[in-house]
């Protein structure tokens, strides 16, 4: 089969187009040459098509078990079910990078489609900058990480199998969602740089960037939550966040992206913080790139790091130097230094959003520092490991601060807020939340500081949000009727903030009130935990397509003997790679999860070390993330984005294709 | 605002890039131990589980064994632990633990929870033995032969593949692969 070579060739052609895209429209925008600028869209379309073809080729190689391709042989096996063969495409360094490139091209293409209302030079610059990023990644794939390399002539009879950790539904969708988020921030980045290049740092670029940033952020939120959920049920020790360098690499752009969404609002509505917002846009995407570098260079040791290769590391470092270094240099040279003449008081919404930004950026730098500190320490000849205690301490300080500013700032107005208004609004939700701060933890166990604080923050945020809604709709007949009349972007904000409240509640309660017990159990044994009786019913041998497993069946019942749950936990041994995997048995519940995982077989008839957990409110962590992502989707669905587009380009209303004609008519007129 | 201030981010990034550049040469898995083919460094440290016992290098002789550097703060150690238990129990490989910069109580709890694959664990709270060995980070695993000479160093997680390809050749009695044809 010649297909893999075809895929490689398509990739090289795509690289050529990316170079053209990076050069021609930017020169066109500089010279003011319409024709050169207009080349941006066709170049983008063709480049995207070629990368898509290349990706399909690789997928076909996996589905057809073409083990002459080294990457397929290393990450697949003929016994693998077809859906894991599909997802194995991004199961290793080379293929996941190709997925990254495909998603980047997809975003570039989306920008070229949904930018009819934008000025031609802006579109040319934005697509040109995205072309540079595309070219960088494509060259990296072609030169250092091609997934199409062959093993000839000694073709292996079968593949080495996909890492069993990745043979799971969560991991099929986790990387694409995560990359959608990471890469999506490239659009805000490109808009910011285009605005710097064009010298027009007005509110317009912020308005254009906002929906793109929100979509990317929503994807990243889902991606991170999915990763956390996966770690919870697949790694078998019941944790949901480990402050591992790779997790941190995804959290940093998320925090910076959250700050960016808020500061874009200020720049759009009030024309303030221009330089700051541009810097944040650069910063957010840079952190996405930095994450890629950390994961793939092998510079930091981590459980999920890809195979390390210093050669690749140097290449990505060079890419980083060009994109991040170049954009920061451009920023230093072109960002406006004129002091803004628009004033705002210390009680204005601007001030509160500034505090939001300061706290979120501090959090980002906290994570960055904690992740990179071991590296700096090592340079100084010391061995240091920064772990959960540092991050937990920093976040249990920063989160209350963030929520406090949110619950006050939510009532503020642009420019200035009357002190009387704040005095009237703030105390009610604050005081109403205090009893709940004690009542909620009391349902779970003894009172302690952190769960009380967490419940207080979550309930305060909930009440403050409800009060804000009721203020907003005071003229309506009922709260519900009024709520339905609010704008989608407002609903989006409410969902985002409620998501945060739900997540804080989950984190506070699950951290404080998880109970767990390690016991030795053989079939027939019973153990009690938290007033529930866990009975080890039987042990069965089970054979999957590419693994053999010991499956333990448990029945959980209450004191009175009523059966509550059937759980089965597994210990799998993947035959080809020899890896041993734990599959926890979980009964998910809104208020608590029951969780059983198998440790090690112990001497004795079928005896195992068994770990039992009861984890209250753990689902709320991911529910919160889901609410946030829904918030993002609602905000983007706000009709004003479409209205703006229509108002700006009357000729293209209704039919998107008509936009092109309108432009060419204009051009004809000029000629 | 002064334009000079706007250069702060790019300068900060340049410093970061420089650090990355220099540290890239330090790739942890590329490191070769300076101690290779040398006797295991001398030490006198307490036993992890029985603090009243003192261990020294003479305990690392008599048969080929693995010295596994581990700690409760290291997630990758957790990942390899199940396999070490498997090696110790199913293949009867002699594994000595070097508990590195850790808390005694936490480490003991870990062994109770996850199983104890080690003949014994050396408690190196200050990391002095680790320093003598040239430990980069946990986990690391050293092969020490019957004469107490370090023969191989593996950085990172030990799994079936690493055992088969890298470590088992030093254990001819167990793997069978290294037994001379005679």
Image (cartoon, coloured by chain):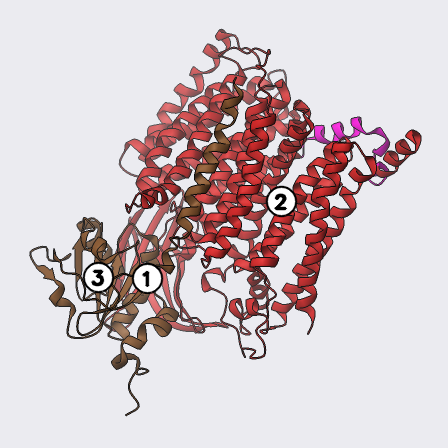
Q: Position of residue A658 (x, y in %)?
A: 86, 38
Mark nearer the viewer, 3 or 2: 2
Residue bearing the label numbered 3: B97
Element marked by disc 1 = loop
Left or right relative to A52: residue A579: left
Q: Residue furthest left?
A: B52
Element marked by disc 2 = helix
The red chain is A
**Which mark is on residue A25?**
none
Estimate the spatial distance between the alpha carbons at disc 2 and disc 1, rounded to whole Å: 37 Å
A380 in the magenta segment: no
Up the image or down, A126 lies above or below A533; here it is above
Up the image or down, B111 lies above or below B163; here it is above
**Which mark is on residue B32?**
1
Badge 2 crowding class, 10 Å Cα cut-off, few under 14, some 14 to 19, many 20 or more, is many
Please report the residue visible at 25 percent of the width from the left and 62 percent of the height from the top. B68
Residue bearing the label numbered 2: A133
Estimate the spatial distance between the alpha carbons at disc 3 and disc 2, rounded to whole Å: 47 Å
Q: Which sits in the foreground, A581 or A40?
A: A40
Q: Which residues are magenta?
A: A637-659
Q: Main secondary structure of the magenta part?
A: helix
The brown chain is B
């Amino acid at each position: 089969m010649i297909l893999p070579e075809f895929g490689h060739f398509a990739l090289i052609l795509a690289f050529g187009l990316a170079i053209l895209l990076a050069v021609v429209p930017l020169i066109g925008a500089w010279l003011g040459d319409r024709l050169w600028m207009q080349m941006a869209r066709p170049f983008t379309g063709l480049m995207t098509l070629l990368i898509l073809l290349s990706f399909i080729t690789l997928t076909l190689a996996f589905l057809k078990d073409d083990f002459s391709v080294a990457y397929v042989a290393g990450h697949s096996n003929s016994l693998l079910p077809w859906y894991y063969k599909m997802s194995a495409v991004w199961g290793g360094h080379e293929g996941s990078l190709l997925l990254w490139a495909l998603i980047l091209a997809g975003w570039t293409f989306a920008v070229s489609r949904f930018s009819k209302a934008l000025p031609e030079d802006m579109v040319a610059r934005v697509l040109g900058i995205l072309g540079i990023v595309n070219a960088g990644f494509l060259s990296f794939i072609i030169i250092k990480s091609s997934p199409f390399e062959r093993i000839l002539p000694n073709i292996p009879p079968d593949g080495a199998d996909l890492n069993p950790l990745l043979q799971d539904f969560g991991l099929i969708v986790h990387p694409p969602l995560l990359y959608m988020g990471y890469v999506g921030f490239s659009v805000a980045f490109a808009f910011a740089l285009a605005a710097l290049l064009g010298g027009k740092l007005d509110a317009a670029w912020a308005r254009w960037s906002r929906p793109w940033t929100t979509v990317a952020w929503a994807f990243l939120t889902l991606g991170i939550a999915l990763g956390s959920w996966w770690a919870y049920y697949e790694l078998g020790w019941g944790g949901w966040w480990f402050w591992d360098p790779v997790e941190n690499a995804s959290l940093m752009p998320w925090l910076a992206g959250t700050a960016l969404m808020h500061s874009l609002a200020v720049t759009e509505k009030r024309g303030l913080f221009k330089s700051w917002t541009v810097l944040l846009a650069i910063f957010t995407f840079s952190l996405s790139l930095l994450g890629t570098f950390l994961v793939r260079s092998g510079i930091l040791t981590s459980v999920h790091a890809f195979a390390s290769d210093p050669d690749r590391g140097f290449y990505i470092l060079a890419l980083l130097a060009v994109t991040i270094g170049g954009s920061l240099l451009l920023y230093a040279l072109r960002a406006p230094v004129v002091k803004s003449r628009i004033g705002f008081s210390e009680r204005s919404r601007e001030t509160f959003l500034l505090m939001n930004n300061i706290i979120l950026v501090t959090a980002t730098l906290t994570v960055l520092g904690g992740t990179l500190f071991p590296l700096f320490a090592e340079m100084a000849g010391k061995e240091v490991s920064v772990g959960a205690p540092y991050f937990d301490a920093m976040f249990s300080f920063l989160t209350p601060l963030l929520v406090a500013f949110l619950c006050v700032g939510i009532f503020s107005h642009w420019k200035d807020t009357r002190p009387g208004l704040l005095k009237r609004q703030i105390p009610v939700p604050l005081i109403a939340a205090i009893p709940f701060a004690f009542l909620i933890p009391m349902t779970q166990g003894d009172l302690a500081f952190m769960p009380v604080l967490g419940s207080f923050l979550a309930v305060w945020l909930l009440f403050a949000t409800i009060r804000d809604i009721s203020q907003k709709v005071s003229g309506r007949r009922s709260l519900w009727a009024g709520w339905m009349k609010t704008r989608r972007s407002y609903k989006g904000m409410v969902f985002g903030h409620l998501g945060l409240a739900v997540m804080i509640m989950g984190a506070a309660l699950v951290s404080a009130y998880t109970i767990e017990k390690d016991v030795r159990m053989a079939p027939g044994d019973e153990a009690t935990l938290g007033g529930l009786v866990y009975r080890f019913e039987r042990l069965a041998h089970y054979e999957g397509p590419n693994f053999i497993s010991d499956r333990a069946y448990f029945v959980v019942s209450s004191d009175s003997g009523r059966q509550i749950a059937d759980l089965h936990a597994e210990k799998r041994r993947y035959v080809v790679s020899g890896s041993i995997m734990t599959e926890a048995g979980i009964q998910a519940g809104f208020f608590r999860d029951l969780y059983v995982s198998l440790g090690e077989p112990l001497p004795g008839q079928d005896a195992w070390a068994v770990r039992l957990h009861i984890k209250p409110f753990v689902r709320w962590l991911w529910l919160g993330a889901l609410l946030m992502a829904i918030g993002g989707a609602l905000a983007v669905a706000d009709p004003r984005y479409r209205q703006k587009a229509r108002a700006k380009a009357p000729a293209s209303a209704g039919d998107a294709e008509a936009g092109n004609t309108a432009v060419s008519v204009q051009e004809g007129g000029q000629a | 605002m002064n334009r000079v201030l706007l250069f702060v981010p790019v300068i900060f990034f340049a410093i970061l890039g420089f650090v990355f550049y220099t540290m890239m040469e330090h790739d942890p898995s590329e490191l070769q131990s300076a101690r290779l083919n040398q006797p295991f460094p001398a030490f006198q440290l307490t036993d992890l589980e029985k603090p009243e016992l003192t261990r020294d290098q003479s305990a690392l002789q008599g048969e080929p064994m693995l010295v596994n550097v581990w700690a409760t703060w290291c997630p990758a150690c957790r990942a390899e632990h199940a396999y070490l238990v498997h090696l110790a129990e199913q293949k009867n490989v002699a594994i000595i633990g070097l508990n590195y910069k850790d808390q005694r109580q936490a480490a003991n709890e870990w062994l109770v929870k996850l199983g104890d694959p080690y003949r014994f664990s050396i408690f190196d709270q200050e990391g002095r033995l680790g320093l003598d060995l040239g430990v980069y980070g946990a986990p690391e695993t050293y092969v020490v032969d019957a004469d107490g000479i370090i023969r191989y160093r593996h950085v990172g997680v030990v799994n079936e593949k690493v055992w088969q390809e890298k470590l088992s050749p030093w254990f001819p009695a167990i793997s069978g692969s290294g037994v001379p044809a005679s």
